[in-house]
Image: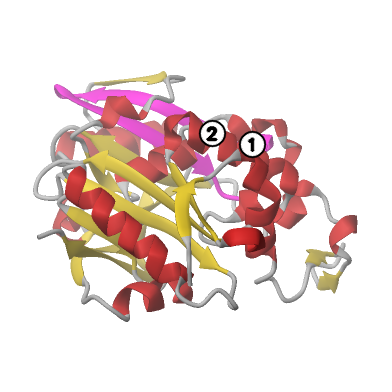
């Protein structure tokens, strides 16, 4: 097959959105009793469509949000790539995030999305080949993906390469608590990923530091009422001489808990953990849900509760 891989264009939005929507078997909404109800796609709101897009695919569930998301990526948030086959047009799409993290990860190229038309045999190989070649010429030490987040992506990679687990994160409920620690937390509105160049992401790293910065720190979706209704904090922290950026979003069904992600220039410290717990209590949260790597768990004390969720981030090391 003769495939061309190129940067996505805004004109590709409809085709990319259709690739993602084609994988949704049934469109549903919740009725007043909390039961799932089958509904025609056209009758769903933007937010209801969004909820069908697991693993950060929500924006692609509608043409309107897909165009905004693609424009965000083209503006520097990520690398959107399409596979084009002659007159067939777009037959595949990959969404990739290139960033530099703290050692030992260093240059990371994270594949967040990869999807192709089932009839376009070999289109996934064309995308993977493009990314491998990009990595060799752009100081990439590791190409990464989140294990089992997408069957198509797993198959496209493992068919040709072996993957090494570079970190394992587990989800915990961390009780908030007043602490004897001095810290400063202020609202942060700068969305530039350049701020976390060379930084680590010790809390919440389910994909890559750069990808999750692009997903969490943008205010792009606050024009959707249901999104805006959930309290969201984007903060710059300073505790005991350590700086950090913190993202915290109130949970949908338990308003006294929230999900947290954190970026730091160094490893996590006990003082920063205490500051986050104290801040959470002052904001009225009883617990903060965090995805924590195994090497950092001991910093949180013995009262955290595992929630049974485990995720591996894997890498194909560049030679």
Residue 272: x %, y % from top left: 22, 34
Residue 270: x %, y % from top left: 16, 40
Callout 2 touching callout 1 (CB < 8 Å): yes
> Quarter of the image containing the C terminus?
bottom left
Who is closer to the viewer here, 238 or 255? 238
The Cα–Cα distance between marks 2 and 1, rounded to whole angstroms, is 6 Å
Tag 1, which secondary structure? helix
* Quarter of the image where one finds residue 15: bottom right
Q: Is residue 269 magenta?
A: no
Give me the residue at 9% from left, 49% from top: 104
> What residue occupies the far bottom of the structure in this picture?
159
Who is closer to the viewer here, 172 or 221? 221
Q: Which residue is mark 2?
A: 72
Q: Is residue 245 magenta?
A: yes
Q: Is residue 40 left or right of residue 216?
A: right
Mark 1 crowd level (few <14, some 14–19, many ≥20, 10 Å Cα): some
Give me the residue at 46% from left, 20% from top: 189
Tag 2, which secondary structure? helix
Residue 101: x %, y % from top left: 20, 41
Q: Is residue 168 left or right of residue 81?
A: left
Span highlighted in magenta in the image: 227-253
**Main SS category, magenta section:** strand
* Quarter of the image where one finds residue 219: top right
Q: Is residue 274 left or right of residue 122?
A: left
Residue 86: x %, y % from top left: 59, 60
Q: Which residue is mark 1?
A: 68
Who is closer to the viewer here, 294 or 29? 29
Confirm whether residue 178 shows in the render. Answer: no
């Amino acid at each position: 097959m003769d495939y061309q891989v190129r940067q996505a264009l805004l004109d590709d939005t409809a085709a990319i959105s259709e690739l993602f929507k084609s994988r949704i078997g049934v469109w549903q909404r919740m009725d007043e009793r909390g039961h799932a109800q089958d509904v025609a796609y056209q009758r769903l709101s933007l937010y209801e469509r969004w909820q069908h897009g697991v693993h950060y695919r929500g924006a692609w569930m509608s043409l309107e949000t897909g165009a905004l998301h693609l424009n965000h990526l083209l503006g520097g948030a990520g690398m959107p790539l399409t596979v084009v086959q002659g007159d067939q047009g777009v037959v595949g799409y990959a969404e990739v995030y290139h960033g530099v993290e703290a050692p030992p990860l260093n240059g990371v190229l994270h594949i967040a999305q990869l999807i192709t038309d089932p009839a376009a045999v070999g289109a996934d190989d064309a995308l993977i080949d493009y990314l491998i070649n990009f990595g060799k010429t752009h100081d990439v030490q590791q190409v990464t993906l989140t294990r089992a987040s997408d069957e198509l992506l797993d198959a496209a990679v493992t068919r040709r390469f072996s993957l090494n687990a570079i970190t394992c994160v587990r989800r915990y409920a961390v009780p908030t608590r007043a602490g004897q620690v001095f810290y400063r937390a202020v609202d942060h509105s700068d969305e530039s990923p350049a701020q976390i160049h060379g930084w680590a992401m010790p809390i919440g790293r389910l994909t890559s530091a750069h990808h999750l910065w692009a997903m969490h720190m943008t205010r792009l979706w606050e024009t959707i009422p249901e999104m805006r209704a959930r309290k969201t904090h984007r903060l710059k922290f300073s505790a005991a001489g350590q700086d950090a950026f913190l993202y915290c979003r109130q949970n949908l069904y338990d308003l006294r808990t929230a999900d947290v992600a954190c970026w730091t220039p160094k490893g996590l410290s006990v003082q920063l953990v205490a500051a986050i717990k104290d801040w959470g209590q002052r904001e009225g949260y009883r617990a903060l849900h965090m995805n924590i790597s195994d090497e950092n768990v001991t910093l949180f004390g013995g009262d955290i509760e595992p929630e049974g969720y485990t995720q591996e981030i894997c890498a194909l090391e560049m030679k």
